[in-house]
Amino acid sequence: MRDRIVEYYQRKTDFIIEKYGVGNRVHFHMGYFAPPAPAVPVTLSEISLGMARAQDHLLRVAFGRWSEYSNLNGNILDVGCGLGGTSIWLAEQFGSAVTALTNIPTHFPIVAEFAESAGVGGRVRVQFGDAHTFVGGKYDVAVAIESSCYLDLDRWFGRLCELVRPGGHVLVEDVTFVGSSRRWKNSIDEYWKIDSAPVQDLLGAAVGHGFQLVDRVDITENVLPFVDWTIAWSRARSQASNSDARRLGISIREHRRFKDALLGNGVQAQLLAFQREQ
């Protein structure tokens, strides 16, 4: 599983930067739209800019809520940091000392370069390692923005109970299955190389290792329009160049399936906050 994830992200890095890269914060997660969502523009550059703004908006909404009870000015572990977008954003917005944890070897220097160019190289420390076995310091907060779906949840929370200080928080934004519904699991897991799970598995793993759920918000309605933007980008990119037509066609098909899963209440996008017992 790990090798498959590493290969997937190393292969997609340039594409992620092309699609979502605006400035020195590159996110690879969904975006948030307050209703009514704006119409999708036509050009690739306008779509990319709109998606980047929506991704920033998701962070503003999530961390704006979480900042009411968690110490975002302290030491933060960003689990599965991608290309460092969230780590850089936290350092910029809260002055956090962020450990950006990645298991993709080629991402290490990219994240470090982005952090330096954003002026927060001294506050973002990039670390290469496995979230299940990572040995770091003590953290006030651990963050997982659409990365918990790649992890063995029981092993991960077992490690977090050693890394997160008593009273500290684990903050998660991710897509989970509703109830026992598995209708869309195979296609979603195969395309994104994840191991998606019902939200009950996430909650159970947390409680089993001494973390209590303190906040939970369904943001499915707000992220749903973002799927239309990603489809529009792939369609416009395919029209601009036939060289990637097959890959982009698969992307459009799988994002449509994902949209159907969201609309059918088979999966939900959620913000979840857990607190470690004192």
Image (tube, rainbow, N blue to C red):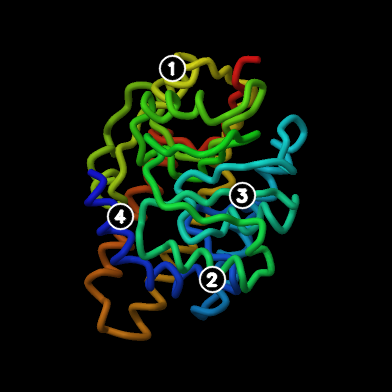
User: Gap in Å between the C-alphas at discs 3 and 2?
Assistant: 15 Å
Quadrant where the C terminus is found in the figure: top right
Decide: is 270 above or below 7: above
Q: Which amino acid does label 1 sit on?
A: Gly
Q: Which of marks 1 and 2 is nearer the N terminus?
A: 2
Which of 42 and 132 lies nearest the eye of the viewer? 132
User: Gap in Å between the C-alphas at discs 3 and 4?
Assistant: 33 Å
Q: Earlier in the sequence, mark 2 or mark 4?
A: 2
Q: Where is residue 70 in the image (x, y as percent from the top left)?
A: 71, 32
Q: Which of marks 3 and 2 is nearer the N terminus?
A: 3
Disc 1 vs disc 4: Cβ atoms closer than 8 Å?
no
- In the rendered view, does 246 fall on the left or right side of 34? left
Quadrant where the N terminus is found in the figure: top left
User: Gap in Å between the C-alphas at discs 3 and 1?
Assistant: 27 Å
Helix, strand or loop at label 1? It is: helix
Q: Position of residue 225 (x, y in %)?
A: 53, 54
User: Gap in Å between the C-alphas at discs 2 and 4?
Assistant: 32 Å
**Residue occupied by mark 1:** 204
> Residue placed at 47% from the left, 49% from the top?
101
User: Gap in Å between the C-alphas at discs 1 and 4?
Assistant: 29 Å
Q: Position of residue 153 (x, y in %)?
A: 38, 28
**Residue occupied by mark 4:** 254
Q: Earlier in the sequence, mark 1 or mark 4?
A: 1
Q: How crowded is mark 4: few (under 14 residues within 10 Å), some or many (20 or more)?
A: some
User: Gap in Å between the C-alphas at discs 1 and 2?
Assistant: 38 Å
Of tags 3 and 1, which is closer to the observer? Answer: 3
**Which corner quadrant of the image does residue 180 belong to?**
top left
**Residue occupied by mark 2:** 113
Decide: is 227 above or below 204: below
Q: Which amino acid does label 2 sit on?
A: Glu
**Residue occupied by mark 3:** 98
Helix, strand or loop at label 3? It is: strand
